[in-house]
Amino acid sequence: MSDRAPPDGRRAAQAIDAFRRGWPVGIAGDAGAVRVLAVENADPAGLAAFDGEARADIVITAGRAQTLKLANQKEAATPGTPVRIRREDWHDLAAAQAIADPAFDLRYPLKGPFHALPAEPGDAFAAALELARLANLLPAMFVSEGEAGGETIGAVTPADIAAYEDPADLAIAARARLPVAAAEQGEIVAFRHRADAAEHVALLIGAPTGEPPLVRLHSECLTGDVLASLKCDCGPQLAGALAEIAAVGWGILLYLRQEGRGIGLVNKIRAYALQDGGFDTVEANMRLGFESDARDFGIAARMLELLGQPRVRLLTNNPAKVSGLEAAGIAVTERVAHRHGENPHNEAYLATKREKSGHQL
């Protein structure tokens, strides 16, 4: 659209806030405009107002669609892509929430059959699902085609969402000396993103030597870092990274606010519940409707750029972190294996990371 306003991440921020509050949002894609309402936060009155004269259909991701036996549909061939389900007479709010949330799969077996419709305009639906993830909600929407109107927040565009997530909008906000147990010569640097106000931190240990620093990218894990969960290896990996950086004398730990591999704390706990039911960590994320790993390591690359460190030795077993940094312009001169925190409770979790996510030692 030639008359479309320039991309603005603030419009995406408003849409994310609306999703969290259970308000409808307008999305203008290149192929058409839609109105969407997040299933998770909808209430009966809001859904009735959203439906208007006709029932709105439901859009979920292909990963979630596999649970509904839609994996053979064209739209469900690629994980993460939108799948549109025709809204049937019995699809009230409770039924839609059962479609969205796998917690109901065994408790209340899903009815059917479900009928997939062409997911058009696809870019608008994909944008809606991404907004839901950014809002830490289940990726499931009531959808109707047409321009935003009435009380609908809108219209946000896919380009607005890209602007919202742009690592270039990250800046250093504050820094201070921070001695820690692993190293008394520490400095903490706080970063803030303009669009989403997310705050990430870097802990610099020692002083630059002219050589690439030993760097660890650590994604926030409340259960592992704070509560010492045995379901993962995050807490021991964090402590081990600080010790290893201190031992070499110069390095940086980046603490990234990307809880649950980018799906948020509540959704991570939902994934834990699915793991308790026998699904592995990858299957659980997919069953919720997410990618197996939704993190963006472009933020880490921007942090290193702002710290003046274009070349690093990376402390990781995850090749995706190496490729993510290199794609964003950071040279990884060496991958250093990082093995900590194995225990009987996380054996299957670590095996899945090796077998399905390509982690290496």
Image (cartoon, grey):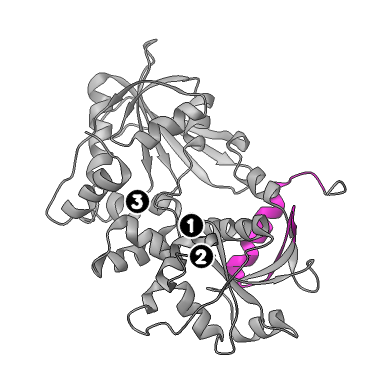
Q: Is residue 89 above or below residue 332?
A: below
Q: Measuring 74% from the left and 45% from the top, which residue is drawn there?
A: 7
- C-alpha distance separating marks 3 and 1: 31 Å
Residue at which label 2 appears: 73
Q: What amino acid does circle 1 point to?
A: Ala
Q: Horizontally, is 183 left or right of 49 in the view?
A: left
Depth check: give the residue in front, 123 or 107.
123
**Picture residue at 53% right of the left edge, 61% below the top:** 74
Name the amino acid, label 3: Cys
Looking at this view, is 224 or 261 the one in front? 261
Verify CB contact (< 8 Å) between mark 2 and mark 1: yes
What's the distance in space between the residues labelled 3 and 2, CA to CA? 36 Å
- Residue kind at label 2, given as amino acid type: Gln
- The region drawn magenta spans 5-32
Q: Give the residue number, with chain letter if any, for mark 1.
A: 77
Left or right: 289 as drawn, with respect to 16: left
